[in-house]
Image (cartoon, rainbow, N blue to C red):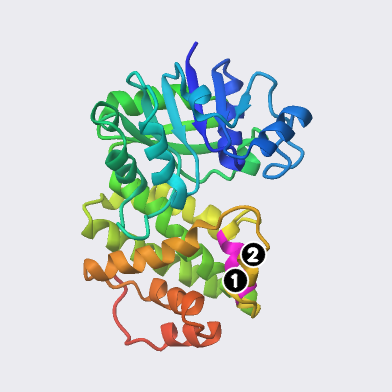
Amino acid sequence: MSKVAILGGGGWGTALSIVLSSKGVNVKVWEYDQKQCELVKASGKNEKFLAGVPVPQEVVFTSEISQAVRGSEVLVFAVPSHTLRGVARKLAKQELSLPLVVSATKGIEDDSLMRMSEVLADELPLPVRERIVVLAGPSHAEEVSRGQPTTVVSACRDRALAKHVQDLFSTGSFRVYTNEDVIGVELGVSTKNVIAIAAGICDGVGYGDNTKAALMTRGLAEMMRLGLALGAERETFFGLAGVGDLVATCLSKHSRNRYVGEEVGKGKSLESVLSGMVMVAEGVRTTRSTLHLAKRRDVEMPITEQIYNVLFEGKDAHSAIDELMSRELKPEMW
């Protein structure tokens, strides 16, 4: 029986623990908040992040990272992107054998502009950093935890490692495909959060389907331009980590990023919206890091730039959309 440690007891980490436990996998979840651990143990549910969803008795929640990782064959990172480096640094101090590392975190780090697998490789010891696999795709924790049919991608240049993660996580309701394009998968599932904020802004200001369709389509073009400039494969952006995650995040009632955009579109300040949320909307930080990455590579990303201006420069949402609509006319091209 496989032993898996999931680092991060939020909605996504809990949902993955439920998936693995359904296959008889021995799962321990590290949650830094001891009180939260005790609440889950006492109630059998993670009400803070997944209200009403039972957590299997076999899943062990602990606030001791050493207890979570001891003897584990697989380490799954499911923490927010801005905490990933710190958690990886803490983990690197533990006694590890040679575990397989699964990155289930989406985002681009603010200062370094690294993808999440690059952050892990930067902090973990040498033998371990060569065993990192990305698990990502359109997968709202609320639906995964309830066994609703979901498909994601296991991405790694090493096909054997990608296949190992595919086999480990696949169930009758959680189907995993493999992909060797790590760059494309990570950029796709990160940058789509920026476009989801844009889609939410459309909802907030009262625009309709035409506007949202335009933003999603041209947003995909931006995602792809950046990906190609960084060495990704074009086809990846038409798969689960591209179009798939883009559709789910831009349209879903579960999407935290779409929600942030909607509230901002209604006229609320970003600070007030974020202060009222329990979960993290990764797209807010990713907007900043994506724009900086695009400028570093001289990649044109007009939607991302306007969302940055709305979120961080106080620009009016209507003005941002008007400016996008009045740009120089050109042929449609990717």
Say left or right for 154 vs 58: left
In the image, residue 9 above or below residue 262: above
Question: Residue 288: where, in percent of width, then height?
Answer: 40, 67
Can the viewer see residue 149 in this picture? Answer: no
Residue 14 in magenta stretch: no
Q: Badges 1 and 2: C-beta atoms under 8 Å apart?
A: yes
Q: Name the residue under label 1.
A: 271
Give percent across and percent down for residue 299.
25, 69
Identify the image quadrant of residue 103: top left
Residue most toward the top?
1
Q: Where is residue 293 in the image (x, y as percent from the top left)?
A: 29, 64
**Vertical comparison of 293 with 136: above or below:** below
Residue sitting at 61 percent across and 42 percent down? 11
Question: Residue at horizontal 35%, vertical 53%?
Answer: 187
Which image quadrant is residue 277 in?
bottom right
**Residue at horizontal 52%, vertical 22%?**
67
Choose between 299 and 30: the one closer to the eye: 30
Q: Is residue 259 magenta?
A: yes
Task: Count how many numbered circles sit on residues in the image.
Answer: 2
Using the image, tell me which numbered label, if any, was put on residue 136: none
Label 2 residue SS: helix
Please tell me which residue is depicted at 46% across the width and 48% down the height of the picture.
Answer: 83
Does the image show residue 279?
Answer: yes
Residue 191 located left or right of residue 171? left
Task: Please give the label number shown on residue 275.
Answer: 2
Find the distance from the CA under tag 1 to the CA under tag 2: 6 Å
Tell me if mark 2 has few (under 14), some (14-19) or many (20+) residues whose alpha carbon lies within 10 angstroms of its own.
few
Q: Residue furthest front?
A: 93
Which range is magenta? 257-264
